[in-house]
Image (cartoon, rainbow, N blue to C red):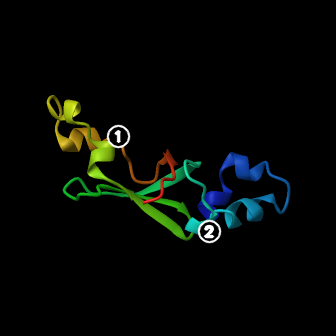
């Protein structure tokens, strides 16, 4: 929670708006199809079928499928470890919510 409040866009919000914004992302029921959001990369495991683990809010975690982060064309010229090296634990990425 402390990490979320250090983001500049959160610091610029009027008092109370941060809580409203976080509360709107506390469950999957509050997310809209195709909604864009920032996610924190919490773990990268190249040998897993879901190699990148993310956290959107204190209660919403997710994972990126191997096929979402590794494209077959890139595999012809690079190793999986090299492709996944751009996903660093602790960094933020933009993700889109999809049902399913």
* Residue for point 85% across, 54% down: 14
For residue 72, side relative to residue 39 (left or right): left
Which of the labelled discs sits on residue 86, or is there none?
1
For residue 13, side relative to residue 64 (left or right): right
For residue 83, side relative to residue 61 (left or right): left
Decide: is 88 above or below 42. Answer: above
Quadrant of residue 24 in the image? bottom right
Which of the labelled discs sits on residue 28, or is there none?
none
Q: From the viewer's perspective, is the residue at label 1 or at label 2 nearer?
A: 2
Q: Secondary structure at mark 2?
A: loop
For residue 72, side relative to residue 43 (left or right): left
N-terminal-most mark, 1 or 2: 2
Check the picture and name the quadrant holding the N terminus.
bottom right
* Residue for point 27% across, 50% down: 66
For the residue carrying disc 2, how many other residues have a C-alpha within 10 Å: few (<14), some (14-19), or many (20+)?
A: some
Q: CA distance from mark 1 to mark 2?
A: 28 Å
Quadrant of residue 43 in the image? bottom left
Q: Secondary structure at mark 1?
A: loop
Residue designated by label 2: 26
* Residue for point 56% across, 52% down: 33
Give residue 3's position: percent from left, percent from top.
60, 60
Decide: is 51 above or below 67. Answer: below
Give residue 72's position: percent from left, percent from top.
20, 35
Circle 1/circle 2 CB separation < 8 Å? no
Q: Nearer the viewer, residue 29 or 45?
A: 29
* Residue for point 51% across, 48% down: 96
The residue most toward the left is 76
Q: Nearer the viewer, residue 36 or 32?
A: 32
For the residue carrying disc 1, how many other residues have a C-alpha within 10 Å: few (<14), some (14-19), or many (20+)?
A: few
């Amino acid at each position: 929670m402390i990490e979320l409040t250090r983001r500049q866009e959160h610091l610029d919000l009027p008092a109370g708006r941060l809580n409203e914004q976080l509360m709107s992302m506390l469950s999957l029921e509050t997310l809209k199809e195709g909604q864009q959001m920032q996610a924190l990369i919490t773990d990268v495991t190249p040998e897993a079928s879901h190699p990148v683990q993310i956290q959107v809010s204190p209660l919403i975690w997710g994972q990126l499928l191997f096929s979402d982060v590794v494209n077959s064309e890139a595999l012809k010229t690079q190793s999986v470890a090299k492709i996944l090296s751009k996903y660093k634990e602790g960094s933020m990425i933009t993700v889109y919510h999809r049902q399913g």
